[in-house]
Image (tube, helix red, strand yellow):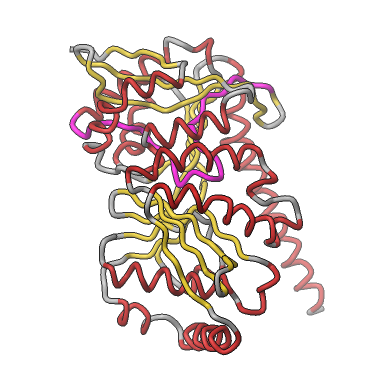
Amino acid sequence: MNLEVKIISDINRLQVLEKDWEAILAQNGYPSIALTPQWLTSWWKSRGENSGKELYILICLEQNKPVAIFPFYSCKAKYRGISIKKLSFMVDAISPHGDFIIASEKRERAIHALLKYLASQKNRWDVIILEKFRDNPNRKFLLTTLDLYNMNYGIQPSLRTPIIRLDKSWDLFWSQRSAKFRKSIRNKLNRSRRAHFISVEKIERPQKLLEALPSIYKISTLSWKGKISQAITDSPVELAFYESFTPLGAPKGWINIWLLKNGCEPIAYEYHLVYNKTVYPLRADFDERYRHLSPGSILDYNIIKGIFEKREYQTYYSCAADYQYLRNWTNNFERLYRVDIFNTRTLSNFLFTTEYKIIPRLRKVRFLRKIKDYLIRKCTRGI
């Protein structure tokens, strides 16, 4: 029996689908907080509505029961400077990753139904851009199936995000960090203890989490990000997301806020998501006036140590790029990819040829030319 595909263009309809959605996610094999209806509702209300985007969530139904969800939006965009109609995952910088939401045993039928539907809607899109796509069976089956629908595609690196496996004792994990890093942390801890009354507070209760939001906004304003207008309160989009998602996620136990305090004054925070035994540190800031105490490093140390010792989680998923300071903590990474899918119309074929045929060849020619020039210079010096 073929699966029926329908479009959801009203975000409020997600509430009706919530139970079915969560049941599919539980069978997905790769459940993530960024794929929950609560996350995507908050993401859309803060980042999608009134931004020129149109909601384009595709639902696969089997006998009127949802079995797969593809969380897309559509908009007008530029691709290599050319105007296009784009479909995209509902992801951006705040999102850990993007993916399809499919019960594992329905994967192949659902992806076939998706591509068949998209092939019938060629006037609605020129390029589908799937950012932060995880390297999992959903992505792999999609790529092996696109040829059947005559759709060209290309893959590019999207993000290499550091992760910590929480599969050993804290003492063993800490002993495996570099001696230089451990010494640096010890010095920072000793300096803060000598100079101030430093304490760490973990906030978990829903009402307390809501009450803590003004504190983290204040710290963000007083951070270095505040000086360059990148505090939470400087962005209506960022502020709207935290104001929307916190009351949705807190009652489900999905949110923790960690505070570092000097006496009674909060001077640093981390806003964490917790879901499916995974910790996602979504945002962190510290009061610039206390930079000399290294509050970010001290809070990081206490949080990671506490997570290891509690032994409730399996993965600390940094949600960040491959920053040097995170390499002090881990050598493990998850690679995320961008998948570009092109329909069979003339414009899309031109864009595919340009992006994945011509430009790579030009880069290769430039690279070879640089090598040639280098060898000529080296040989000339030797004459």
Magenta stretch containing residue 95, yes or no?
yes
Please report the residue visible at 46 percent of the width from the left and 88 percent of the height from the top: 179
Q: Is residue 371 visible?
A: no
Q: Is residue 167 left or right of residue 301?
A: left
182 lies above or below 329: below
Q: Nearer the viewer, residue 270 or 36?
A: 270
Q: Nearer the viewer, residue 122 or 24?
A: 24
**Residue at x-position 26% and y-position 73%:** 168
Residue drawn at x 49%, y 52% is 282
Q: Is residue 31 magenta?
A: no
Up the image or down, 73 lies above or below 364; here it is above
| Rendering quarter of residue 116 | top left
Q: Nearer the viewer, residue 51 or 131?
A: 51
Q: Position of residue 60 (x, y in %)?
A: 30, 19
The image shows residue 171 at horizontal and vertical percentages of 31, 82
Of 159 and 308, the residue lying toward us = 308
The part of the chain drawn in magenta is 83-105
